[in-house]
Image (spheres, rainbow, N blue to C red):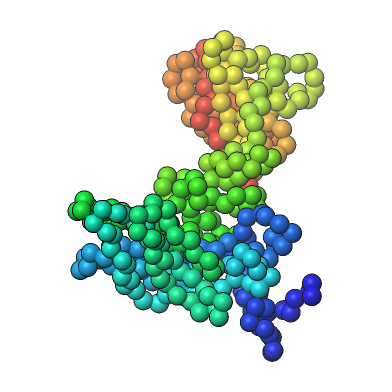
Amino acid sequence: MAERLPGWVAGIRDYEARLASGLLVTSAELTDQVDPLRVRSGIRDAPGHPGHVTLSETSRNRVLVNPFQAVIQDPALPHRGAYLVTLDSSKELDFAPAETSRGRVHLIIAEVDPDAVFTVRVVEGASGTSEAPPATNPHLKLAEIRLPPAAYGASPDLIDLRQFTAALGGILPVRSPTDRPVNAAFSFFIYRLDTGVLEVQQMGSGEWAPYHPPRGDAWHEVKPEITALPPPPGHFQNKWVNYARGYATAAYTKTDDGWVRLRGLVKSANVKTTIFTLPTGCRPMVRHIFAAATSGKEARVDVTRDGNVGAGDEPYPIGWVSLDGIAFATYE
C-alpha cells in the first residue's frame, strides 16, 4: 500500500517501525522513485572514534573494532526501512594470515542478514587477490585489511572505510571527497574530516564547494551631489566629493545580520556639514559618534537616526576624512 501506518502504534509491523525511525535520519542520494524512503547508511558520529578499526597490539592477525551505533539501509528494499544497530562494546576479530608468497585483502563490515541479525565480522578475501571481497547482505564497510605476502615481513595496511550519517537537518561528516553524497538534497551540509572545511552544494551545478556565510548587500557607492531639496539619500551633499582617483570611494553596505558599514576617503571645503544621507533601512536606532582619521588630526563623524553622515561639532583641518571602520547596528 502507498499509505504507511504512523509510527509507534499498536500492532505496527517491524518494517513500519524501521520506516518511522528513518524519519529522523538524513536522506540518501537520489537514485530512483522511492528516494523519499531512503536514508543514508552510516555510523552515528560520537566521541571515542565510533566504529574505528585498529590492529591488535597482542596478536598479529587480529583487529579491534570500537563500539558504535549506525543506520543500515537495504538498498534493494528501501520500503522495508533502515535498521538501527548497536555494537555496545569493543569487539576483537581474528583474520586469516597471508601466505608466504601471496598477499590477500580482507573486509571488516557491520552487517544485517536476512533474519535481521546484526553482526560485525571479517569477510575474508581469497589468497593472492588484490581487491576486497564482496559482501552481499545490507552492510556498512568499516575497514579494509591489506596483507602483504608473509615473506615480506611487513605489517598489514589498514584502511578506514567508515561512512557516517547524521540526524535530519544535521551536518554530515565525510572522510574525503569520494565520501561525499551523490545527488544529495541541496539542504545538505557536510564537514570534511580531512580538511576541516564545511561544504555545501552549489545550486544548479550540484558541485560541492566551501561554505561561506552570507555577506549581505553589495557596496553602494555614494553618488555625485545633485540640486534637490531635500537632498536625496545616497548622494553627496555640501560639496563633499571623493578624495582622488586611486583611493576608496565613499560607499555603504548592509550585512545580513543588520549591520551597516561605511568606507571611503572624502573631502570638502565645508567642514562640520552632512556628507551624505543613508537610505531608510540603513539608519541607526540611536545617534552614533565615531573617531575618524583626517589629513590633520583625529576628528569626529556622526551618524544620526535620520541617516545623516557628517562631521561633528569639533573642527578639523580641511583635506580629507576617512569613513573606513564606521559600522553600526540598525536595531537596538
Q: Residue shown at 45%/16% (left/top)?
A: 296
The percent coordinates of residue 113 (x first, y second) are 53, 75
Say whether residue 76 is left or right of residue 148.
right
Q: Residue shown at 50%/30% (left/top)?
A: 325
Does 88 sit above or below residue 265?
below
The percent coordinates of residue 332 (x first, y second) are 61, 49
Is residue 318 at least partly visible in the picture? Answer: no
Say whether residue 134 is left or right of residue 95.
right
Q: Residue shown at 63%/16% (left/top)?
A: 240
Which of 90 and 23 lies nearest the eye of the viewer? 90
Q: For residue 9, which quarter of the picture? A: bottom right
Which of 61 and 191 lies nearest the eye of the viewer? 61
Does 66 sit above or below residue 31?
below
The percent coordinates of residue 66 (x first, y second) are 36, 68
Q: For residue 104, which quarter of the picture? A: bottom left
The percent coordinates of residue 12 (x first, y second) are 68, 85
**Residue reaching furthest to the bottom:** 10
- Count the marks: 0
Where the N terminus falls, by quadrant? bottom right
Which of 86 and 31 lies nearest the eye of the viewer? 31
Say whether residue 85 is left or right of residue 187.
left
Q: Residue shown at 45%/52% (left/top)?
A: 175
Is residue 243 at least partly visible in the picture? Answer: yes
